[in-house]
Each structure stands twice: as structure tokens, then as C-alpha cells.
Amino acid sequence: MNETLKTISQRYSCRAYDGHLPEKEKLEAIALAAVQSPSAMNRQPWQIIVITNKSLIEEMDAEGMRILAEAEDKTTYERFMNRGGSVFYNAPCMYLILKQPGTDMDVGIVSENITLAATSLGLDSVICGMASIPFNGPKGDEFKKKVGFLDGWEFGVAVLVGIGKTKGKPHTPDISKIRYVE
């Protein structure tokens, strides 16, 4: 098996990090992989903000958990409480992908490049749509200002990166989802 296919087969969604920040060279390599993503007509309708400020990540995490705790439906809150009581799982780094309206597919490609680059460098990751909660909540404008959202840009998705507390297992592929038309 070639290295790319091996990396794809080893990637898993890490939901428990040891909190230690990976080497800067690895974080920069992942950021470069993000902006090397293909996009429709090469418009590159994204901005990548690499957040390594642990106190800011923890502040956004606390706000996300507060919002979930106050929600009428407690299902999501309880799910996160069962996973350690954290939206961001003690991740030391967040790749925040901002987008222009209507570019969700491009954001998905960028997030996959980030996760595969992280895996190839021996790091763990998880794509985290729940990172939208603090940016869309009552303190959203404050968080957008702290991380440097520019006018006309919106939250796309986040990818959390770090070193997992333990190594997880990739999901088992469901090959019944594949069909060939010959």
C-alpha cells in the first residue's frame, strides 16, 4: 500500500488530547497542506487561522459548553459530558477554516487535507463543526474579533489537532456503500 492510502486508512477522529502543543514545523506543514487544497476554479475561498492560544481555546470551549448546557434539548450536552465535558477535547491547536458564502465543498476539502497531513506527521485530529457554537453565541462577535475574522467571511469548520491521550482506531469502512456501474 502506498503512503497516501496508508495515511487515509490510519486517520481517526481523536476526542481526547494530552494538551501538549506539537512542534511549530508540523503545524506550519499542516497549514501549508490546507492552502494547497484544490478549489472550484482555483478561487481558494478560505482563510486558515491557526489558534494555539490555549487560554483562548479554553475560553471558547467553556462558552460552547455553557451554551449547550442551556439548550432545551440536552442530548448534545450530555454527549460531550460523557466524553470529558469539553467541546474541544483539550486540543492544543485549532485550525479554523473561514469561508466565503456558498463554498462548503471547498471547506470540506481543506478540512480533509488538514486531517490527512496531521496523520501523516504522527498527530491526531478531529473535524469539529461544533466549534461554530461559541462563534454564533452571545459572545460570538468577541471571539470573532479575538481570532481575526475579516468582514465578509464566516465560520466554515474547525479541525482540532494535537497528540491523542491514546491511539484510537479508524472506523471500519462499509464497503457495501460502494457500487460500480460497468
Image (tube, helix red, strand yellow):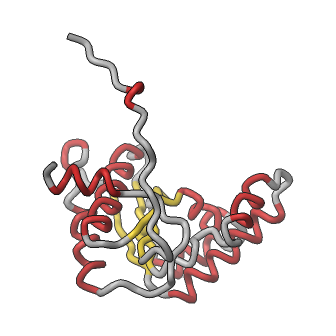
**Percent of width and height locating residue 139:** 68, 74
- In this orientation, does residue 123 appear? yes
**Residue 119 image position (x, y, % from top left):** 31, 65
Residue 167 lies left or right of residue 65; in this view the side is left
In what quadrant of the picture does the C terminus appear?
A: top left
Q: Is residue 147 left or right of residue 73?
A: left
The location of residue 15, given as percent across then percent down, is: 54, 66
Above-or-below relation of 39 to 90: above
Give the residue displayed 40% in from the left and 39% down from the top. Answer: 173
Which residue sits at x=26%, y=79%? 26
Q: Position of residue 178 (x, y in %)?
A: 35, 25
Residue at screen point 55% across, 72% down: 16
Residue 150 visible in the snapshot = no
Q: Farthest residue in the left direction?
A: 2
Compared with 106, 174 (above or below) is above
Indicate the quadrant where residue 118 lies.
bottom left
Q: How many marks?
A: 0
Q: Residue drawn 46% across and 74% down?
A: 164
**Which picture quadrant has residue 94?**
bottom left
In front: 3, or 30?
A: 3
Is residue 6 or residue 95 the one in the foreground? 6
